[in-house]
Image (tube, rainbow, N blue to C red):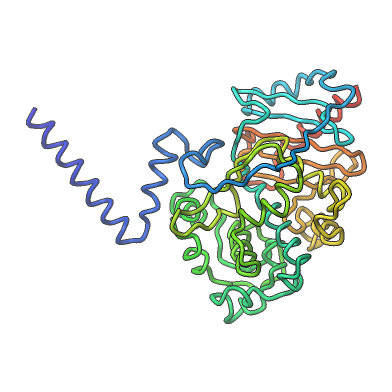
Amino acid sequence: MKYLKKLLKFIILFLGLLIIVLYITDTDYLIKAVRTIYLKGHTTAFLEDYKEFDNQTIEASANPIAWSNHKDYNSAQPTEILKKANKNWGTIAYLIIKNDSIWFENYYDGFGEDSKSNSFSMAKSYVSGLLGKAIMDGHIKSLDQPVCDFLPAFCEGKAFTMTVGDLSSMASGTNWDEAYYSPLSITTRAYFDDDLAKVMNGLKVVDEPGQRFKYASGDTQMLAMVIEKATGKKLYNYLEESFWKPLGSENSTLWQVDSEDHDLVKAYCCIASNAKDFARFGKLYKDHGKWNGQQLLDSAFVAKSVTPRFPESPEYGYGWWLIEHLGKPFFMMQGHLGQYVIVQPDDNIIIVRLGHSKGPGNPLESYTDDIYIYIEEAYEMLNN
């Protein structure tokens, strides 16, 4: 018994000292990481972790527009390959939208058509769209306007030439390190820190901006700060009034913020919504920024967004991933663990997949094998 008491005292003392060290070294965000992620058995963010963080609500449309069902709605069965992928990789939603109608839909693992799950980096496409909207509304001059006009921390040295377009196209030249599984990376800090602006303002521009694509979630976070400064509006409110309500979204959604005190959205990730409402943004871009006859987003900006900025990096435009497969061009929203809204405009097809995992392989690759399967099997179902 004495041994157990001594051991308990030692553990309490050790934990107390550890917490003190974390605060002294400015790594106390790890306390939240352990509490919200690691103690729940996860090694990285997960689909329903939004429940563990502060969120702001984005209201549904007062005039919601339900997707219509295709005349062949759910008449096809998933292929055996798709069934296996969905089971093994934890799919929670799989949709095929043909000619703006739901051609196939299915939900798994206790999730339904209105269930919320984390968008992860699909949110980047929304933020880039909000940049286009801010330009359209006259709050920002163009893609070439300097970031320095809005964020004073980026007015010296190489940072002075960085533009808002560089942020949207992931070409900022900053020292951001995109490392999801390292507890000490800036990516992890940004996910758990309660003062995101402080984290972002500490970035350094180490390479010449606008020269090459380098995927960096920090670019989108900085872009969000630019848009808020330019519009004078919180980004969650700007999303609500610019897209969420006008697109007829049927469900309210949540956007994680760093804390109640600072109230800055985690712009690079973390919109909690459902497959059908996520699909609306894919349809908006498929239709060149027009929805129900209203031009919500400039068509030229949409076209530029789904075109590679750098020839040597054909996989990315402005906030959208680009891929050639089956002899067809696709553009897509893409998020951690395999969240996808995949659009083929010529065939008028949108494929949505949400789930727990991308499957085997390096999860940080631009295009993992699961993406090709979700596309191929959708076309196999359509052709049969």
Residue at 68% x, 76% y: name it. 146
Q: Position of residue 52 (x, y in %)?
A: 46, 41
Q: Position of residue 93 (x, y in %)?
A: 68, 29
Question: Farthest residue in the bottom direction?
Answer: 156
Number of labels in the image equals: 0
Residue at 59% x, 64% y: name it. 225
- Is the N terminus in the top left, top right, bottom left or bottom right quadrant? top left
Residue nearest the viewer, comparing 316 with 299: 299
Q: Considering only vertical position in the picture, is 32 above or below 115?
A: below
Where residue 353 sits, quadrant-wise, is top right
Q: Is residue 48 left or right of residue 310?
A: left
Where residue 375 sits, quadrant-wise, is top right
Q: Considering only vertical position in the picture, is 215 above or below 37?
A: below
Residue at 67% x, 39% y: name it. 339
Q: Is residue 121 left or right of residue 293?
A: left
Q: Is residue 195 left or right of residue 242?
A: left
Residue nearest the viewer, comparing 236 with 184: 236
Q: Position of residue 119 (x, y in %)?
A: 63, 42
